[in-house]
Amino acid sequence: MILDELEARLRPPARTMPPYPPKYIVLASGQPLVIRQARRDDFPILLETVEPLARVRKDFYDIVASRMYAELLGQYIHRLLDPYCLVGTINGVVASIVNGRMIDERRGMSYHTLTVHRGLRCGAHMFAAKMEYHMEHLGQDEVFIVAESFIGFKRWMIEYQLESRPDFQHELGGVPSYCLTRALYDTYKPRLVAGTRPVPPEILATADTLILPDEYPQIPGFKR
Amino acid sequence: MRQVGIVGIGHTKFGRMDFDLVDILAWSSLEAMKDAGISGGIDQVFVANMGAGAINHQTAVASALVSRIFLEPAMAETVENGPASGASAVKCAYMAIASGMADVVLVTGGERMREVIPWKATDFVATLTHPDAEYAYGVTLPAFGGMYTRAYMERYGLEERHLAMLAVKAHRNAERNPFAHIEEMASMGGIWDGPHRDVVNPIMADPLRLYDMCPVSDGAASLVLCAMEVADRFKKKPIRVAGIGQATDTHCVHNREDILDLKAVRLAAERAYTMAGIGPKDVSCAELHDAFLILEVAISEAVGFFKPGEAKLAIERGETEIRGKRPINTSGGLKAKGHPVGATGVSQIHELVKQLRGEAAKEERQVKNPKVGLAVNFGGFGNNVVATILAKE
């Protein structure tokens, strides 16, 4: 009993957040990328997906995967306040993961974007979905973002022309903070945010049970 | 003149490489020497490179390569002719051997372009344009590609879907090429008539879309060439260099009488055909410089494969597929194999050698019984072009 009480004191207050309605994007390959909110029962698979990338010393996968692992674990064991995670799948296989959290009603914080399946711009679509969640479903006006990789900087800071907010202390530490404002989102949405809703049931069903990637282009010869 | 053959080929994977430029060059060079069955005995080295000085802060890369792979005291030069540097280096090798100055020559083309961010690389390539009349106004090669495509579409009725069909072909071929930068398939349902086309395949330089353009790549390709009279020293049968033609056109594109007439391509091909004693109908397979997919279309017409405006019909009929009547860019082309500018001309010839030897069969992209291959390496925006013809003996 005492442990339950202690656990209750450790947990941040739970707040119900609006759901992210699933959507799909037809990729250049013709395959649908289904993007949906991660459920609690998905987290063991998500953690197992991310873990091997924490040792990839290329394109900053090591730091991004390490941090995302901690964030997902934090969400799973109730150590984060108002977090969310979206997962993108191709034929059920985890292709990309994004996460973040609400700061308050008007402001959000983007954490990380991690892509396993490279070459089809899955990461770009997932980041766009994350911004869509903050702006259109959480109804926020600002999302605070940092980049910890060159690819991230090109994709977010430059493609969305994010506003520099050096005085904002992002939770990820010291790298300079940027902000997606509603005006910027509305400007870039037609070019960068895609997706169709509702997802046809037969396509959505492929994403119901997540499948671990059995290969990682980042890890030649990977064997699980 | 002495006859010249190719007895060794080497290639790195194209893409992004975390090695310094000279290591990249060394890798493919050693592969080519291994393929030829030699560990030395090179008289001359030519390195094709465009960007080392500007991008990698390194010059004299031919000297550096010689020393990295212990080929001293071989003669060595770096050859720079913009994106046609590779074929120009092969031409230099041909001249060195044909003249009797060298018996065995190593040609390696390579770049490390992804050391800088993509638009820096685009800007660097744009320095080949006229500094006052073009570059100063913001012209880039993708901009030229877009303008050329629009003009071509208006005159000949080419449609965007034809380019999408070429992109799908390029990705399909590259997917079977272990050296290709792009490893993902593309489909018409994704890049052409898919519901999210404008986000998945956005316009980059109107009317060219993302999938109509080559990526920025690192990588290298190498050849060992020799005088045919010493070819029996090597492990594999030589593929003969049957013809080389080169031609130039005005530096400023706007000074051309007809912007759509790729005169330097036409003349380079004619000269190569004349030297080889063949015509376009004799070519079994071709590697054409498709930095933008419109160039595969326009070059295929300029070299005489199709009448002006009719390449689109060949695309519709699938004639340029590996199993088609006129296979083009079986490697995936620059579009999907990648385009490390200095490497490209050498890589095109690498692919032709592979096809003529029958070695593409194990990658399931072998052209049926090829006898003659044509490569066109397009420098500038068509102002310095080298055409090379190889023949199976």
Image (spheres, rainbow, N blue to C red):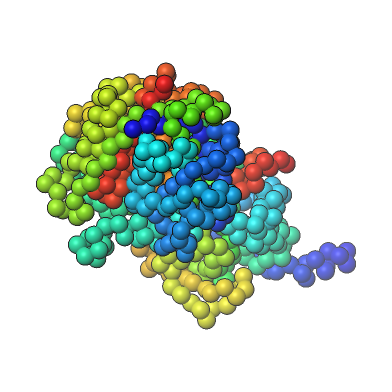
| Percent of width and height locating residue B270 | 23, 32
* B207 in relation to B187, above or below: below
Quadrant assignment for the C terminus of chain A:
top right
| Percent of width and height locating residue B368 | 42, 19
| Percent of width and height locating residue B55 | 44, 61
* A48 in relation to B57, above or below: above
* B44 in relation to B123, above or below: above
Residue A166 makes an appearance in the image? yes
- Residue A165 left/right relative to B328: right
Which residue is found at the position 41% from the left and 63% from the top?
B54
Determine the image quadrant of residue B301: top left
Quadrant assignment for the N terminus of chain A:
bottom right
- Residue B382 left/right relative to A210: left
- Residue B153 left/right relative to B286: left
Which residue is found at the position 65% from the left and 47% from the top?
A219
Give the camera-side residue of B310 and A156.
B310
Which residue is found at the position 56% from the left and 53% from the top?
B67
